[in-house]
Image (cartoon, grey):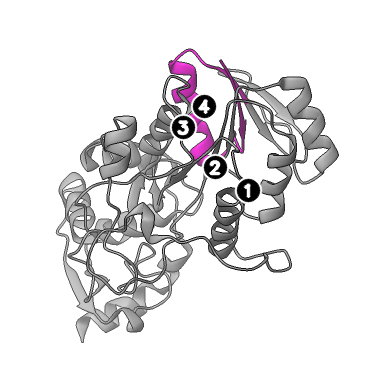
Amino acid sequence: MKALVLGGPGFIGTATCKELMRRGVETIAASRTPHPYGTFTSHLAFDRADEAELARVLGEVAPDVLLDLAAYQPSEVEAVIRHFRGSRYIFTSTGVYPDLFEDRPAREEDFKPLEGEPPPEPVEYREGKRWCETVLARSGGFPWTVIRPPAVVGAGDHTLRIAAYLERVEDGGPLLVPAESYRRQAGLAWVRDVGYAHALAADLSRPAGGKAYNVAFEGVSLADLIEALGRILGKPAVMVPIPFAELPKGASPYGPDPRRSAGYDLSRIRSDLGFEPSALEDCLAEVLAWYRVERPSHPGYAGRARELELAAG
């Protein structure tokens, strides 16, 4: 089997390529710019936004599976539908679910395809993912599968959101958290689990089905995450709940936004693909090793003094 991974050199792409290769899949990572990737996979540099270039690469590589970790403009997915002739297209989505105002995990069927025609591009990220999924739902017979992770945690995450919590726990001061939602399940997934889910979905021994699958930790709240960080750093994890609307920007980049669902339901990915989420502690051990070497800092930490003032009262 041959897999082409659009966005393969990225954060999620690296985890996906490694998992595919571990399973013996011929794996080709692709991105717009050259990348020093030869140590563990081959790489193609091309601009997938150039439809003629996309068609050329798909024709020459002839992948059995196309994993698209990068698209969020509906026209990009429409181009894939026109030119991909392999067995399976796997689209990486995000939290496309509407604001449910319900304290329960989101189920895949909570998302409904949008009505009408896609708006002029560029479309912002979350809305773009919704339109991409809508295009797939309308495609009629195209062999698609969607993987839906929420916020993805892991070593090397360029958003540095996990570093925001590590920095605050490490300095020993209290952390501001949203009073409405910090104890309920949060929308978080380990990057390795997302790569694992991609590889499960790419297994051609399973039917394609035209389905979406949630991938996430199960039962992990923001409080659980912060308390676990306190244990591994040997620091007190003191949380000060305040209304979500009053949180300073960057103080709690994972939210959770109380308007969103309480995490993700994993029933479908378990039953169809045999997925089981990893333990939070396994993820954080890897994250901590990265943090101690790289010492990354989240931009929101610049406002730490104001957070401590709010926490004091």
Magenta region includes residue 267: no
Query: Mark 2 or mark 4: which comes first in sequence?
Result: 4
Position in image of residue 80 (x %, y %):
69, 40
Q: CA distance from mark 3 to mark 1?
A: 18 Å
The answer to whether the residue labelled 2 contacts the one labelled 1, judged by CB atoms less than 8 Å apart, is yes
Q: Give the SS element for disc 2.
A: strand
Mark nearer the viewer, 3 or 1: 1
User: Which residue in the structure is indicated by mark 3?
Assistant: 15
**Amino acid residing under circle 2:** Phe
The answer to whether the residue labelled 3 contacts the one labelled 4, judged by CB atoms less than 8 Å apart, is yes
Mark nearer the viewer, 1 or 4: 1
User: Which residue in the structure is indicated by mark 1?
Assistant: 71
Q: Residue at x 21, y 38 (%)?
A: 279
Mark nearer the viewer, 2 or 4: 2
Q: Residues within 10 Å of mark 4 (few under 14, many from 20)?
A: many
Of all residues shown, which one is farthest toward the right?
A: 52
User: Which residue in the structure is indicated by mark 4?
Assistant: 17
User: Which residue in the structure is indicated by mark 2?
Assistant: 91
